[in-house]
Amino acid sequence: MEKELILKAEIREQTGSKYAAEVRKSGRIPAIIYGHKQEPVAISLDAHSFIEGLHHGRRLMDVQIGKSKQKTLVKDLQYDHLGKDVIHVDMMRVDVTENIKVTVSIELKGTAKGAHEGGIVEEHTDHLEIECRATDIPESVVISVKELDVGDALHASDIVLPEGVKLVSPPDTLIVACRLVAEAKTTEEIEEQAPAAPEVIGEAKEEEPSEEE
């Protein structure tokens, strides 16, 4: 079951990258709370308390604004250009009696049988989308690969989820496979020997603008 954390929030009267930078300099993280047919609210959270909660695997947090307390789920984290520090948080209001869809990480455990026969384990995805109550969100989905032999694979439909948790990802999603190292080397050699694609000269594709608060 998800652990709970109460965070005292402050309303942000002004938004935008300039003011968000000032918030971060003061040791707080800009955030926004939305959902449950209520207006989004721009807030700031104590950076130390929030990050400590994340490090302990907490995604369900109570946010207190004045005398009002709202149960929220950490829905999205925005990091700096180095991918190190959290610079913005999206938090969704939740009702513990309702089911919600969330993405959870996959954790592989054990050594595959095929590894003793020259095989290597390849992880094809590191997350799954599931549906459950907010209080039942697992910190991660643990998958044992001990029985994987060379040529074997595990798909989303093969995973046994905790009670009350429903799979949302497509059942045929490939999660992990075991194949011979020799096959992997052959594939790499083929890619290296393949002729390079001709360079196309033309108008460069414009990158999508990234919004930063």
Image (cartoon, helix red, strand yellow):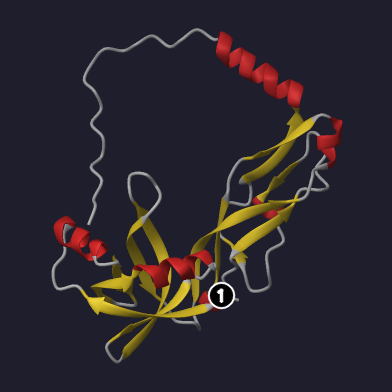
Query: Which residue is at the front of the view, 110 or 152?
Result: 110
Q: Is residue 26 left or right of residue 100?
A: left
Q: Is residue 57 left or right of residue 143?
A: left
Q: Is residue 85 left or right of residue 191?
A: left
Task: From this view, report whether residue 12 is shown above or below residue 17.
Answer: below
Task: Give the image quarter of residue 35.
Answer: bottom left
Q: Quadrant of the N terminus?
A: bottom right
Task: Give the image quarter of residue 178.
Answer: top right
Task: Give the image quarter of residue 194.
Answer: top right
Q: Position of residue 25 (x, y in %)?
A: 24, 62
Q: Which residue is mark 1?
A: 2
Q: Position of residue 34 (x, y in %)?
A: 31, 72
**SS for callout 1:** loop
Q: Amino acid at mark 1?
A: Glu
Query: Which residue is at the front of the view, 28 or 4?
Result: 28
Q: Quadrant of the C terminus?
A: bottom left
Query: Which residue is at the front of the view, 14 or 164?
Result: 14
Mark 1 burial class by Cα count in 10 Å: few <14, some 14-19, many 20+ = some
Q: Residue at x 22, y 65 (%)?
A: 23
